[in-house]
């Protein structure tokens, strides 16, 4: 059955639907199933139509919530208030938020802020969610309250519902799951945690893979010499390996810069609560929370040096996004170099041949396009756009709180995921597999008048320029023209104008 299709099921179909009599048809909006043996509600991820609802209450009053929903009133209000983009908070963000809730429960148990039963139930609920298709229970749009309060309460309510079932008595979303926290510190904390984990688990390994593949390819193509180009015009020759090692160093530099930002991401706002003063949080909560979270994730987190700065600004996210943009710019350069070298095959440079992955045209038979470099270039453009959004959002730290946290989280994690996925594709389906067209390289080098640059120290710039212009106008090899206009012997010129020698530099 397709997701989103409205269908009819009957009472006999398990799991049994609360409040529905046998044989009575129920209209539901079906979503992909997920599995959790302990909680049937996790197995049937669906929105029961509003004719089958329950009443939930919050501080603003009561409202109807889908009967089988794990969330409560505040989440339902957000769903109704923000039907804007139908985009939910990123999976990586929700995962980090759930882990943060488990760490908070363990820290609060140590500090005797909640009971052992409440803590165990919260941690158990988080584990069950992480083992299921948990995103079905987080319907809040990314365009919501700027503090991310709706998403925080979504997590609190879902966890509280499951924890209550585990414990057999009420676990309150505010008093127990959210104990020692506010949206104003848990959401900035989750931005840092999710980005740190995404870098650690996704992007940095992908970039390391790109470096390895590029450097291995450089070894394979070391023997090939090609015409260098500046301003897209013919220049002195370079080795193919020099080109690829240049790319590799670009990526290595980006990796180093991203790694340099990891300590800032691992510095957390948790414990600052509403405005940075730490009101309603135990004095030791911040340190114990960070320690518990480090154990859960395998990444070392620590309390921030100044919680006012971490709640009132998103400077770290802006800095990380800026470096992601720099990485995107590097990938754009590599993608463009590949496209140019692959251009043709007859009327372009044709220096390399990229792997043919799919037909390139619906009207021109036989045409094959550089689809992976093109996709990479589009990723780069998107990441640059994401950075612009984060830059604007980062300016919205008015007084004690930034109020564009959800779009900062969404764009930051989107950039990381896009760069990670495209880096692996660029490595495996473009760089690793391209072939060098040696005949094209030699043909271009033989007609390149710029080789005469090597004669500058011997005959002077003006004389060399005259030889280059003559060779170009007459379409003759530069060595033949130089032989006519200088006292140098052919054997000397062959040594001086050897393209392979010219790639080594020096005088």
Image (cartoon, rainbow, N blue to C red):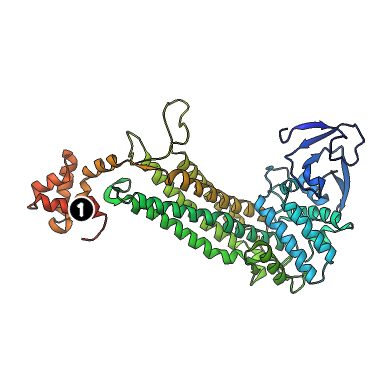
Q: Which residue is mark 1?
A: 453
* Res 337 visible: yes
Label total for image: 1
**Quarter occupied by the C terminus:** bottom left
Q: Is residue 238 above or below residue 33?
A: below
Q: Please give the name of the residue rendered at 83% of the width and 62% of the height, measured from the top-left corner.
A: 118
**Dot 1, crowdedness within 10 Å: few (<14), some or many (≥20)?**
some
Instruction: Say left or right for 125 vs 229.
Output: right
Instruction: Say left or right for 108 vs 221.
Output: right
The spot of residue 442 in percent (x, y) is: 25, 43
The spot of residue 86 in percent (x, y) is: 69, 42
Q: Quadrant of residue 402?
A: bottom right
Q: Is residue 406 above or below residue 299?
A: above
* Res 59 visible: no
Q: Please give the name of the residue rendered at 15% of the width and 50% of the height, measured from the top-left corner.
A: 494
Between 204 and 418, the one nearer to me in the picture: 204
The spot of residue 493 in percent (x, y) is: 14, 51
Q: Residue furthest bottom?
A: 283
The spot of residue 297 in percent (x, y) is: 66, 61
**Quarter occupied by the N terminus:** top right
Between 64 and 127, the one nearer to me in the picture: 127
Helix, strand or loop under label 1: helix
Q: Residue furthest front?
A: 37
Q: Residue furthest left?
A: 487
Q: Quadrant of residue 363?
A: top left
């Amino acid at each position: 059955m397709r997701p989103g299709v409205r269908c009819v099921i009957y009472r006999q179909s398990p799991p049994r639907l609360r409040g529905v009599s046998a044989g009575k048809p129920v209209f539901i909006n079906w979503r992909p199933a997920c599995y959790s043996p302990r909680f049937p509600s996790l197995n049937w991820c669906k929105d029961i139509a509003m004719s089958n609802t329950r009443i939930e209450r919050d501080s603003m009053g009561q409202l109807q919530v889908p009967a089988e929903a794990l969330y409560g009133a505040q989440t339902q209000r957000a769903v109704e208030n923000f039907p804007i983009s139908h985009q939910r908070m990123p999976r990586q963000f929700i995962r980090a938020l759930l882990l943060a809730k488990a760490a908070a429960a363990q820290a609060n148990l140590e500090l005797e802020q909640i009971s052992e039963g409440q803590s165990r139930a919260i941690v158990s609920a988080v584990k069950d969610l992480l083992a299921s298709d948990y995103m079905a229970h987080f319907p809040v749009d990314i365009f919501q309250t700027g503090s991310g309060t709706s998403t925080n309460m979504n997590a609190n309510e879902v966890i509280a519902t499951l924890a209550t079932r585990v414990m057999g008595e009420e676990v309150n979303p505010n008093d127990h799951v959210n104990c020692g926290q506010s949206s104003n510190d848990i959401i900035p904390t989750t931005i840092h945690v999710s980005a740190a984990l995404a870098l650690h688990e996704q992007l940095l390994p992908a970039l390391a893979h790109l470096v390895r593949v590029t450097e291995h390819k450089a070894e394979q193509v070391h023997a090939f010499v090609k015409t260098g180009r500046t301003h897209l015009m013919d220049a002195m020759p370079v080795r193919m390996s020099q080109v690829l090692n240049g790319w590799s160093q670009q990526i290595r530099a980006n990796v180093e810069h991203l790694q340099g930002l990891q300590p800032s991401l691992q510095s957390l706002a948790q414990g600052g609560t509403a405005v940075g003063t730490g009101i309603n949080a135990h004095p030791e909560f911040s340190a114990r929370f960070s320690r518990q979270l480090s154990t859960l994730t395998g990444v070392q987190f620590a309390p921030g040096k100044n919680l006012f700065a971490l709640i009132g600004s998103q400077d770290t996210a802006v800095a990380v996004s800026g470096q992601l943009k720099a990485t995107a710019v590097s990938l754009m350069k590599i993608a463009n170099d590949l496209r140019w070298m692959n251009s043709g095959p007859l009327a372009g440079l044709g220096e390399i041949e990229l792997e043919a992955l799919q037909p390139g045209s619906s009207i021109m038979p036989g045409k094959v396009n550089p689809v992976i470099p093109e996709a990479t270039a589009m990723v780069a453009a998107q990441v640059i756009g994401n950075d612009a959004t984060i830059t604007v959002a980062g300016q919205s730290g008015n007084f004690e709180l930034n109020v564009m946290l959800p779009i900062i989280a969404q764009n930051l994690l989107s950039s990381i995921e896009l760069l990670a996925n495209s880096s692996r594709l660029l490595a495996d389906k473009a760089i690793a597999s391209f072939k060098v067209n040696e005949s094209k390289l030699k043909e271009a080098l033989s007609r390149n008048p710029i080789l005469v640059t090597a004669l500058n120290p011997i005959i002077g710039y003006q004389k060399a320029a005259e030889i280059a212009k003559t060779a170009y106008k007459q379409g003759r090899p530069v060595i033949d023209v130089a032989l006519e206009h200088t006292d140098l012997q052919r054997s000397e010129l062959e040594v001086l104008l050897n393209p392979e020698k010219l790639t080594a530099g020096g005088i």
